[in-house]
Each structure stands twice: as C-alpha cells, then as structure tokens.
Image: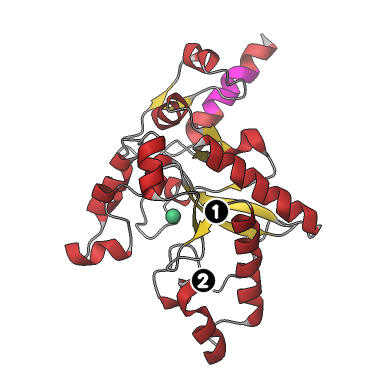
Amino acid sequence: MRLLTIVLCFTFYRCTTHHTDTESSVKEISTNKVVQQLGVIDSVTLSALEIQMQNANLINVKWLNSDIEVDLRYSTTDNFLQQDVYGNFDNAYLEESTAKKLALAQHHLDQLKLGLRLKIWDAARPVSLQQKMWDALDVPANQKGRFVSNPKNHSLHNYGCAVDVTLIDTSGIELDMGTAFDQFDSLAQPKYEQILLLSGALSNKQITNRERLRAAMTTAGFYTISSEWWHFNSCTRAYAKLNFRLLN
Ligand SMILES: [Zn+2]
C-alpha cells in the first residue's frame, strides 16, 4: 500500500508540475504498456512527441552521457516566441551518429579538467512544430527567416542532426558568451566576432568561451554556422536528406 501511495504521488507530481499548454500539439500519453515496450524504466509517462522521437530511432543524449545538461527552451515560455511549443517534453533527442558526436564533445571537455559541461537548449524538432513556430512569428513573411529556418526547407533540427548548445561551469552557471540564446542580432553572429571584439562590443573572455565551445564541438565532428554561436550541424542538409529520417 505504501508503495502504491508513493507511485500515485509521483504520478500526480509529474502531471501537476509539467507544462499544461493546451495549444500544444503534444499530448501526454499515460500508458505503462508503451513505456515498457520502449524499454524506458524511469518514466511514468511519455509525451506523444517523445514517442515520435523514439519511434524514429533517435537517441536521448542522456542515455549516452548523463552529465550533459538539458534545458529545452521551447519547452518553456523563456524563448523568443514566449510560448511553450513542446509542452510535456523536455528531453534532447538526436540522430544516433550526431548524439555520439555530442558525447564525444563532452569527452573532449572532460579532458580539459575545467569542470565544463554542455547544456542543450534544443535538439531534434519535428517539422510540424517548426511550422508552428514559423506561424507564430508576428513579422512580415520575408523577415521570418531571420528567426526560424523556413519549415519548407527542412532544418537539420528536423532530422535530429543539429543542436543548440552552450557551456556551464561546475556550479551549473552558463558561461558568458556575450548574448542570450536566440538573440537575433550581430552580437550573436560568429562572422562579426573580430569586429565586435575590436569595437569592445564583445570581450576577450566572451570570445574565448565561444572558442572553447566551438573547439569541443568541431573536434567531435560538428560544423559551425556564421549566424548563431550556439548552433552546430553534424552534416549537410543534402547528406541528412539521403541518410536520415525526417521528423514530420
Ligand atoms: Zn539551432
């Protein structure tokens, strides 16, 4: 009886503490059968989004290295849309080889012995939710691409081949990278870093922190982009289209 009470309390706790976004397309499914079939032993419930990711054979990065921190910003209202897009889903999933590269990046950081860890802000993202983000943008259509990749073009996030990531220290505090996540101005764009450094808009420390993140990620096989310091791709769109499943 005591065990049953604990289980019921835990279930209630999860249901009341997770997001209750009714607009989200993510519906919580509570079924032990599915949980058992998927081999997940530490979850009472799985969101439909999580089931979709597991059915697509994507890998939860925590399965490879539980030291990697996950804080999906689109599963909160703390994002540029100020909307909870993911609902009751807060795990980072990636295509298998991409997830392995991420674990390797954490390994490279471990070797520095500075206590640095990766913190994931976004990983695999279905096209349907990218469309939702696109539609939610209250800017002229020709400006939307500044904020979200056009869902018609299928971002590498839609294949689980891109990750948005920063670094945290031993206290879990994010390193100063000069901008917040999804700050869409020149300060966030690596292509302007040297100019911004010379002008004093970015400090040496901020550039060094970005370079430390880039070194760990690129050594592990990721590619940078010129417009967002936090975004890393594991392959090209053409390669992903040929080799990996699109998350619809
Ligand atoms: Zn990204």
Residue closer to the observer: 224 or 77 = 224
Residue at horizontal 46 percent and vertical 45 percent from the top: 161
Residue 220 image position (x, y, % from top left): 63, 51
What segment carries the magenta color?
Answer: 6-12
Q: In the drawing, what numbered circle is on residue 222? A: 1
Q: Secondary structure at mark 1?
A: loop
The secondary element bearing badge 2 is classed as: loop
Nearest to the observer: residue 235 or residue 140: 235
Name the disc covering residue 179, or none: 2
Please name the amino acid that badge 1 sits on: Phe
Q: Residue at x 78, y 59 (%)?
A: 112
Query: Is residue 171 depicted above or below 26 in this figure?
Result: below
Q: Is residue 242 magenta?
A: no
- x and y, in percent, of residue 239 in the image: 40, 44
The tag earlier along the polypeptide, 1 or 2, is: 2
Which residue does the image show at 54% across and 35% down from the upper left?
Answer: 96
With 49 as the anchor, is 206 left or right in this view?
right
| Distance from Cα at disc 1 to Cα at disc 2 | 21 Å
Quarter of the view holding residue 126? top left
